[in-house]
Amino acid sequence: MNAIEIKDLTKTFGKICALDHLSLNIEKGKISGLIGADGAGKTTLIRLIVGLLSPDSGSISVLGLDPLTQKEELTAKIGYMPQKFGLYEDLSVIENLKLYADLKNQPHHFDKMLEFTSLTPFQDRLAGALSGGMKQKLGLACALLGTPDLLLLDEPSVGVDPISRRDLMKMVREMINPQTTVLWLTAYLDEAHSFDTAIVLDKGRCIFNGKPHDLAQTSQAFEDKVIELMGGYKKETSKIAQNYKSLSDFEGYAVEAHHLEKKYGNFYAVKNNSFQIQKGEIFGLLGPNGAGKSTSFKMMCGLAKPTSGTAKIMGIDIAKNPTKARSNLGYMAQKFSLYGSLSLRENLEFFASVYGVESKNHKQRINEIIEIFDFWEIEHIKSEDLPLGFKQRLSMACALIHNPLVLFLDEPTSGVDVLARKEFWNHITSLSKKGVTILITTHFMDEAEYCDRISLFYKGEAIAIGTPDELKQKAGAANMEDAFITLIKESGQ
């Protein structure tokens, strides 16, 4: 029996086709994963399922009801956890639970829920003060109030580490009623094998719908098969690296951290962090949410002042000479952080000025970048109107406009499709071969394999540094995700 039946569903927004004659069934009592990058059509579909949007054509039945004409009856049967968990951050844990219970006409019996989610000691803490993992648990608890027949989870694992992702899946399986249907949206292909059914969307179309093991036995093989279904990936010479100017003859470490610490009151966000990165090395910072990666990243960039210790870029102390140090540094921030109201070209012009490209060279350098990245047809489009893949490429172009010797990348591939990730890493590995030093954070464990070395963070400290193979060997693990989880758990014991 099917919980959701979709037939020939189409939804457009202007010239953009979000869902293109989509047909699929979602089985009752199963956990189905709806997998796809930003722009694949996941969020549009979930909004159609709950009746927030009406389709251009086609039909949709949810629990035997029409989402548009029987919306009130359907709402009573659905639990929904939106992106960012849907919590009221100025309310406490217990106040959020009471609010959601009142909205669903449920009694205030929360002891079992608090105990199961390990939130009992934190029930009076404001939701805004919770860690990412705790917010995740509270959001799920609120969605499950009233034992829904259909549980919709809109990218609950985005931006969280593998341990939190596994814990959330375990919690969902243990807390739901056996007859409850779960639709779990995600951009992570490596989550496919945790679902009973995997549904892969690409550009509004379903390219796979079935048991994950029917397509491939492992996460990496599943990704490879999905790439084939998307038309395949052909590795080409990176024009970005090919056109990169020759680098300096600098000898020594390109990036150095010496006993870096950051305290907030009595709390150590980063404690005694030291590492050195060679010229041309790809160095990854990995760790659970709240481990200290982003704080370390900000101190290395000069965006946060350390409580103690020093950070150097190309031998220059960033605290003593920030302007000179930053002239060697390109920074690609987490998510899309450029100026949406400016055109692509205007963003390049702005960052050329910020990074100190000489005025007389602005036009020539910007034209070079537009040529290298193949931006000519979109140079005058506002960046907020660009597809995510082009936004990512523009962010990278802005970070590289002054030919930096060091590149800092903070979760640069979050949300983009697997082909865009492949293309991105082709550029990164090619740049490293030209001598560019790269410091990167990521939650994609397969991307960690591209790093020459990795520093694994936990509770503000680096608990292990080594090559991917060295860390896997130390953990006795076959892949980086298992190594990550094993080393973190061993450190916490």
Image (tube, helix red, strand yellow):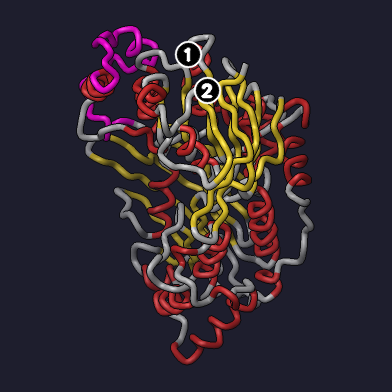
Task: Please provide percent x and percent y for residue 462.
Answer: 49, 38
Residue 479 image-quadrant placement: top right
**Which of disc 2 and disc 1 is earlier in sequence?**
1
Identify which residue, 178 or 338, lies in the foreground.
Answer: 178
Residue 59: quarter of image:
top right
- Residue 61 appears in the rendering: yes
Secondary structure under tag 2 reads strand
Mark 2 neighbour class, 10 Å CA radius: few under 14, some 14 to 19, many 20 or more: many
Task: Choose between 100 and 140: the one closer to the eye.
Answer: 100
Q: Residue at x 40, y 72 (%)?
A: 342
Q: Secondary structure at mark 1?
A: loop
| Residue 392 in picture, x, y percent from top left | 54, 60
Residue 414 in sight in this render: no
State how far apart marks 1 and 2 are (Cα).
9 Å
Determine whether 42 is above or below 399 in the image. above
Q: Which residues are magenta?
A: 102-130
Label 1 sits on what residue type? Answer: Ile
Query: Mark 1 highlights which residue?
Result: 176
Q: Using residue 233 as the reference point, say whether residue 415 is left or right of it.
A: left
Residue at mark 2: 182
- At a point 76% along the width and 66% down the height, the residue shown is 237
